[in-house]
Amino acid sequence: MPLVLSGCQKLELEVDVPGCIKNKIREFKNSDITCEEGASVTRYNFQNKIVYVFSPGNCIADGRAKVYGEACDELCYLGGLAGNLECQGEVFYLNVTNETIVWKN
């Protein structure tokens, strides 16, 4: 009987990221909330920090994207039922620079 260790699968990323973010991407990739298509993790500069947006894709009409800092601290969420656009007191997408796709399906 073959043994499969999913935690040991190589994760193909577009750029280098901190270890805890890699772990979060592995969890996200295999999560029930992640759509089969259109899901992504994108890196931005926001409020003089590097942040990562975990977007589940378009299969969930009111899905929300979580925003994490480099130390895997959850900063906010975007979207959801309320259509939230703010993160830490600022409209997120009006105040980001250096968009870089880290992972997508």
Image (tube, rainbow, N blue to C red):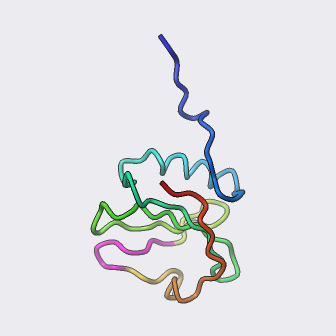
**Foreground pick, 77 / 55:** 55
User: Residue 78 magenta-drawn?
Assistant: yes
Q: Residue at x 62, y 55 (%)?
A: 21
Res 47 quadrant in image: bottom right
Horizontal side of residue 18 vs 7, given as left or right: right
User: Residue 84 magenta-drawn?
Assistant: no
Q: Tell me residue 91's x, y (percent).
A: 49, 88
Q: Tell me residue 13's x, y (percent).
A: 63, 53
Label total for image: 0
Q: Residue at x 59, y 35 (%)?
A: 9
Horizontal side of residue 42 vs 45, given as left or right: left
**Foreground pick, 35 / 63:** 35
Q: Which residues are magenta?
A: 76-83
Q: Tell me residue 48's x, y (percent).
A: 70, 81
Res 56 quadrant in image: bottom left
**Foreground pick, 101 / 27:** 101
Is residue 103 shown above or below 89? above
Q: Tell me residue 92's x, y (percent).
A: 52, 83
Residue that protrudes farthest toward the top in the picture? 1
Horizontal side of residue 13 vs 34, given as left or right: right
Res 59 quadrant in image: bottom left
Q: Residue at x 67, y 72 (%)?
A: 50
Is residue 26 shown above or below 78? above
Q: Residue at x 60, y 48 (%)?
A: 23
